[in-house]
Amino acid sequence: MSGGLPRLKPRVLVVDDDPTSRYVVEHDLLNLGAEVLVAADGKEGLRMLLDNVLDLDLLVTDLEMPGMDGMALVRMVRAEGGEGDLPILVISGWLDPEVRSALHALGAAVVDKGDGANTVAASARRLLASRGWHIVDGKAQAPR
């Protein structure tokens, strides 16, 4: 967390080129009490990530996007960016076992969109808890 007053909500960046998926994920995260930033593709997501990396608690990205896909974004964050602590959740409607393994090797959690929005929300809740955030009845309790 950067200087100043402590945040009252976890901050999450959602990167997805599909407006419907982006809206659903954003809505689910808002229901968890998070502050949500959204980007429509990997390049915009990377710019937003660079501007906010010290204040982000979670990155949620789609895998298949034009231009910079989710795998490239995760690699940029982990390898080139050196950001090994930021939890990353990759969501996709298509998950090849080799791609899943590669994402896990980069320290990303992976969720199949076909498993439903509750799976995305549950994974996000778990990853936010790894950063000290606890979600109770849609209200985030800040890390102590």
Image (cartoon, rainbow, N blue to C red):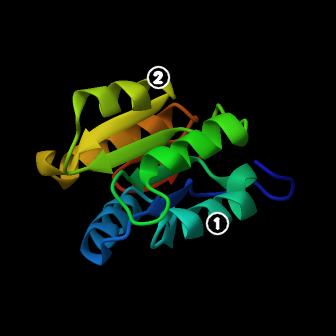
**Quadrant assignment for the C terminus:** top right
Indicate which disc, 1 or 2, sits on the residue closer to the N terminus: 1
Mark 1 or 2, closer to the camera:
2
Q: Residue at x 30, y 27 (%)?
A: 98
Callout 1 crowding tier (Cα within 10 Å): few <14, some 14–19, many ≥20: some
Q: Residue at x 72, y 58 (%)?
A: 50
Q: Is residue 143 left or right of residue 23?
A: right
Say which of 137 and 52 sits in front: 52
Query: On the rendered structure, is 81 left or right of 63?
Result: right
Indicate the secondary structure of the residue bearing disc 1.
helix
Amino acid type, callout 1: Met
Q: Is residue 126 left or right of residue 35?
A: left
Residue 63 image position (x, y, % from top left):
36, 51
Which numbered circle lies on residue 93? none
What is the number of callouts on the image? 2
| View extreme (bottom): residue | 19
Q: Is residue 47 visible?
A: yes
Name the residue tied to disc 2.
105
- Give x and y (percent) for residue 88: 49, 41
Residue 16, image x, y percentages: 39, 65
Q: Which residue does the numbered mark 1 point to in the structure image?
A: 48
- Image vertical order of residue 25 relative to residue 107, above or below: below
Q: Position of residue 51 (x, y in %)?
A: 74, 64
- The amino acid beneath tag 2 is Ala
Residue found 66% across the figure and 66% down from its top: 47
Residue 144 visible in the snapshot: no
Q: Measured along the vertical axis of the image, is residue 105 above or below residue 44?
A: above
Q: Secondary structure at mark 2?
A: helix
